[in-house]
Amino acid sequence: LDAVVRANTERNIIYLRALPTENMTSIILGILQEQLVKPSTLQAIYASVWWKGSDTEPSTSNTASKNTLVDYASARAEVAKLRTHQLPAASGYEVTATLVSPYDAEPPSPPSLPSTDDWMWGPGNASNLSFGEWLQRYVNPGLSDLKRFLNLNIYSQYLYSVTLDALEWSKLSKDRTHRFYTSAQLSNVLNSLEAYLGQHASERSLSNETYEVHGGLHLVVVIDSPTREYNATSRKPLRFHISGSSRSDPPSSIALVPQWGAFISVDDVDISLENLGGVLVNTIRSFVGLLVRSQDVVTVGRSGSKVLLESGLTTEKIVKWELDLWLRRRAIESLSTAVLTLTSLVRTIERVPTMVINWETASRVKSAVSAWSEAVSELASPPSTSSKNPGAKAFCAARIALENADAAFFDHSLLDLLYFPSDQVFGIYVPLFVPIGLPLIASGVAVLRFFLKKST
């Protein structure tokens, strides 16, 4: 190994092996460009917002220079994959964790786990907490860093007497060790299960005279443990073949549905109550755009130096360099989306000159532009040594810019029914008034002729 990037939550620490100065400089530059900062990826994020899906790609002359260590095409492919999976940039997210249990609740008891369901009687839950209380204790601490920058609200609900097999029959593996769903089957399960989940927790609410757009995320925890003594059917563990329909694909206990949520099978084999909290935390982090990766040895620079990236899979704090990279990525994505939204608003006003912009909408546009300029200045200026997270100010300013831009664009006053182009106005009102107007004009002409003849 030539270098080690420590998994530290307070500062970015890189250990380098004693090498000639030129080699050390090359290693540091490679670590910054390929792992810690990723300028090509940041440029690809900006381009992906403006790219319209045509064959003409944005200009990459500045990024595809000879000194660039990361291929722009590969960076853009990585961004496209992330944007397909993660939720769009927003000021907050509503996370709904749903516990799916095939057992009936006891009517006299308040909403809680039935006594026959012993999944919470394990060593990870000695206090016999309810599902909501368990989430507050074992999941919320792992989201504390994200809650400094996002409004994350976690809700819990139960679905009793519901089994996935009742919605779509699973398949049995050839070795008869587990049941599984393919991607096509999981789509049918999702469509049927949404009727039980209720409306997705995604809303646009008015709070303190500002709009807050919250994205929605579903986490479906399927309790199907085959180790219960009273389970006479001896059900096989549930797995998901999410990479394809072939049975040769490796099975997984987690199925991620892009921009929707995840199915998590708790069967005391791969995932149990002891590690479920970490699984939920890392799943939420991945959907809000935070890269979740295990400890790995990567190759950086043209010399192929080996660098160890220590694992950032923790259930409490996020590694500092991963958090800094996430702040920069989300800041640039929010800025690009805010500019695109304001540009669409300007084009709409240009097409409809009669549209009236009230004071509230104008102030939101002004606040969005001001916050956008502040975020760009923060990103362009060198980070302060006293700042704990250098990209925090830029991220917060970019989030404010995006919120105000969305609030201005979706303001209800801009949806007046009288905002029609002139040709549509004439096309609607001319056929309506011509049958009435012609007799009136003819009557007026006749009356005028009558008085003219009388006067002569």
Image (cartoon, rainbow, N blue to C red):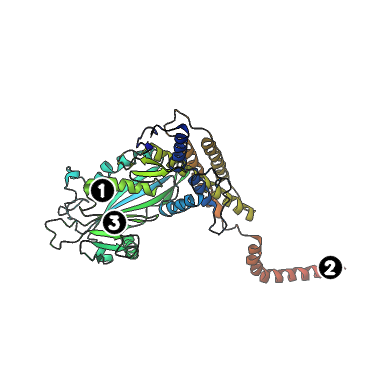
Residue 200 picture location, percent across and down:
37, 55
Residue at point 40%, 40% (across, down): 322
Residue at 31% x, 48% y: name it.
Answer: 155
Marks 1 and 3 close (CB-CB < 8 Å): no
Instruction: Determine crowd level at label 3: few under 14, some 14-19, many 20+ residues with C-alpha closer than 10 A.
Output: some
Amino acid of disc 2 = Leu
* Residue, disc 1: 276
Work out whether residue 352 can be spotted.
no
In this rendering, the label closer to the viewer, 3 or 2:
3
Residue type at mark 3: give it.
Ser
- Most extreme residue toward the right is 456
For this view, does 316 lie left or right of residue 424? left
Callout 3: helix, strand or loop? loop
Q: Earlier in the sequence, mark 1 or mark 2?
A: 1
Front: mark 1 or 2: 1
Spatial CA distance of label 1 from label 3 is: 14 Å
Q: Amino acid at mark 1?
A: Leu
Residue holding disc 2: 452
- Label 2 Cα crowd, 10 Å radius (few <14 / some 14-19 / many 20+): few
Numbered disc 2: secondary structure: helix
**Which residue is tagged 3?**
252
Q: Count of labels shown?
A: 3
Q: Earlier in the sequence, mark 3 or mark 2?
A: 3
